[in-house]
């Protein structure tokens, strides 16, 4: 439709025109208009929120986060069972709790589904949720069921955690001179997704297993906090993208050393080739490992390995060479 002068009306931007971070940068100021509560210690912008709740027994610092999975976007039934989906949606939330330095306490689950969803699939989902919760030492304490139009299947989980007296570890605490370390694997889940898409799951079964059921190093989060971690993030969207979030929040540059990533690339190269392996390690999402920074001279906690150093500047570099913030983005791709 044209206006009275015959000009095409301006096209309104859609979420596909923005990255996830750009969209949130517009949303957060609107939400901030709701006001500030004295109970909120950490609000939007980190892996999870922190609420300081005071009662007769003193103050409890409660960590809260939520995430969802959508069939067709976050999983395909041909690749993942209900058990896989339950374990995965729990893991990605539990990793956010751990990234704040907290111990998981409880999960709340919302399931939105069409009426023709098999009961067996719902029971499998519950089994996967229970499996992940049991491994994390937490409980599933409730949630919600809702109907949806044909073809819709969405699972959302809210995870709660306790800091147990520790200060929360934020993305904004990294300082020049700190060392960068990671707990967990790099690129394995992304390699699994690539192999599933290519119809070659047999090329690296451990990668496919990690894509279906991530294994975040949950106990390493509280250990990092106790060891004095200055910043930490769950690697959900890729090493470069998530490291960039720490760099931006802290006002520093994270300089990764290529030599420290070589073993991760070599692990994937036989199945994906050198270029594919390198791309998965640098930009692959859904790994849910923990990237943290520590003051210089701090002994790294068990399970962490050195990746580089924090330097003055901005963004992420690899051996001093600036890197584009590549990785998973829900809307921009």
Image (spheres, helix red, strand yellow):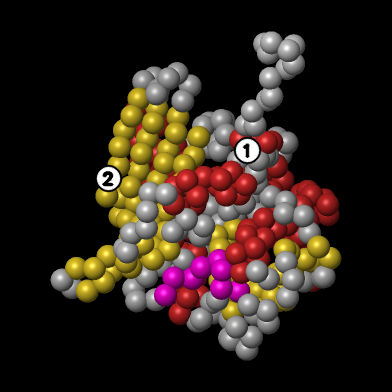
Residue under the point 69% across and 75% down: 310
**Quarter of the figure with residue 178:** bottom right
Does residue 307 appear anywhere in the picture? no
Residue under the point 69% across and 24% down: 10
Q: Mostly what secondary structure, the magenta segment?
A: loop
> Where does label 1 land, which residue?
331
Residue 268 in percent (x, y) is at 74, 55
Question: Which is nearer the eye, 236 or 18?
Answer: 18
Work out whether 194 lies above or below 47. Answer: above
Q: How many marks?
A: 2
Residue under the point 63% across and 89% down: 297
Q: Secondary structure at mark 2?
A: strand
Which of labels 2 and 1 is toward the front? 1
**Which one is earlier in the sequence, the residue at label 2 or at label 1?**
2
Work out whether 72 lies above or below 174. Answer: above
Quarter of the image where the C terminus is located: top right
Q: Which residues are magenta?
A: 167-174
Quarter of the image where the N terminus is located: top right
Question: Between marks 2 and 1, how big is the CA–CA gap?
Answer: 30 Å
Question: Which is nearer the eye, 256 or 172?
Answer: 172
The reply to whether the magenta stretch includes residue 289 is no
Work out whether 74 lies above or below 265. Answer: above
- Residue lying farthest to the left in this orientation: 56
Residue 102: assigned label = none
Residue 65 in percent (x, y) is at 42, 53
**Is 315 positioned to the left or the right of 44 in the image?**
right
**Is 94 positioned to the left or the right of 244 in the image?**
left
Callout 1 environment at 10 Å: few (<14), some (14 to 19), or many (20+)? few
Question: Which is nearer the eye, 72 or 329?
Answer: 329
Q: Secondary structure at mark 1?
A: loop
């Amino acid at each position: 439709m044209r206006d009275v002068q015959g000009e095409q009306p301006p096209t309104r931007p859609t979420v596909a025109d923005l990255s996830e971070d750009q969209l949130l940068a517009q949303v957060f100021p609107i939400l901030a208009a709701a006001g500030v509560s004295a109970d909120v210690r950490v609000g939007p912008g980190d892996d999870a929120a922190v609420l300081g709740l005071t009662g007769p027994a003193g103050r409890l610092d409660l960590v809260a986060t939520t995430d969802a999975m959508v069939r067709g976007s976050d999983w395909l039934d041909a690749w993942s069972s209900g058990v896989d989906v339950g374990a995965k949606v729990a893991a990605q939330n539990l990793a956010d709790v751990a990234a704040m330095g907290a111990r998981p306490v409880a999960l709340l689950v919302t399931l939105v589904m069409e009426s023709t969803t098999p009961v067996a699939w719902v029971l499998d989902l519950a089994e996967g949720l229970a499996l992940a919760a049991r491994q994390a030492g937490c409980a599933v304490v409730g949630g919600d069921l809702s109907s949806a139009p044909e073809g819709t299947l969405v699972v959302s989980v809210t995870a709660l955690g306790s800091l147990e007296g520790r200060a929360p570890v934020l993305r904004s605490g990294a300082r020049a001179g700190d060392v960068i370390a990671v707990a967990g694997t790099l690129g394995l889940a992304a390699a699994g997704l690539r192999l599933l898409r290519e119809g070659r799951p047999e090329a690296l079964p451990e990668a496919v297993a990690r894509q279906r059921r991530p294994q975040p190093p949950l106990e390493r989060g509280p250990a990092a906090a106790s060891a004095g971690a200055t910043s930490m993030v769950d690697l959900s969207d890729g090493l470069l993208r998530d490291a960039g979030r720490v760099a931006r929040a802290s006002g520093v540059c994270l300089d990764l050393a290529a030599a420290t990533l070589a073993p991760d690339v070599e692990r994937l190269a036989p199945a994906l080739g050198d270029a594919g392996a390198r791309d998965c390690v640098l930009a692959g999402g859904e790994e849910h490992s923990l990237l943290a920074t520590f003051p210089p001279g701090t002994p790294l906690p068990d399970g962490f390995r050195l990746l580089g150093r924090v330097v003055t500047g901005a963004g992420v570099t690899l051996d001093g060479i600036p890197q584009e913030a590549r990785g998973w983005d829900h809307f921009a791709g």
